[in-house]
Amino acid sequence: MQLTPAGQEVEYAAFWGVASRFLDWAPSVIFLFCYEVLGSMVIGLQSLVIFFVCAAAIYWTVDMEKGMADVSGKLELRRVTEVAGLKEDKIVE
């Protein structure tokens, strides 16, 4: 939520949901493919190591401070209505 641009929360939530479903089964499918097609469990394990190294590289290259600074200027666009019975618009930070 900290890096989500204001006004695009739904799009990012949908992308997050699809990506998490894909990443739930992708390592298993990669391992199964390598084991069944190539016949080597070692290649399957090496492919999983490559998969997690790529994920770690992406994680380490994300600049959280810059992302939060980019988004902080548009927080006034986030509005919530009818949260816990509240009927009026309220700016959420």
Image: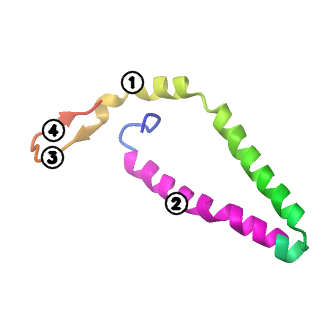
Mark 3 or mark 4, earlier in chain:
3
Mark 2: give few (<14), some (14-19) or many (20+) Cα within 10 Å: few
Quadrant of the rendered structure where residue 43 is?
bottom right
State whether the magenta stretch is mostly helix, strand or loop: helix
Rendering coords of residue 37 (x, y %):
86, 76
User: CA separation, marks 1 and 2?
Assistant: 28 Å
User: CA separation, marks 3 and 2?
Assistant: 28 Å
Q: Which residues are magenta?
A: 9-34
Residue type (three-letter) at the residue carrying disc 1 = Gly
* Element type at mark 1: loop
Seen in the image, is 81 located left or right of residue 14? left
Mark 4: give few (<14), some (14-19) or many (20+) Cα within 10 Å: few
Mark 1 or mark 2, earlier in chain:
2
Residue type (three-letter) at the residue carrying disc 3 = Ala
- Check the image and report above or below for 13 versus 58: below
Q: Nearer the viewer, residue 4 or 31?
A: 31
Extreme residue toward the bottom, this view: 36
Mark 4 or mark 1, earlier in chain:
1
Residue where numbered disc 1 is placed:
73
Count up the numbered dots. 4
Residue where numbered disc 3 is placed:
84
Residue where numbered disc 4 is placed:
89
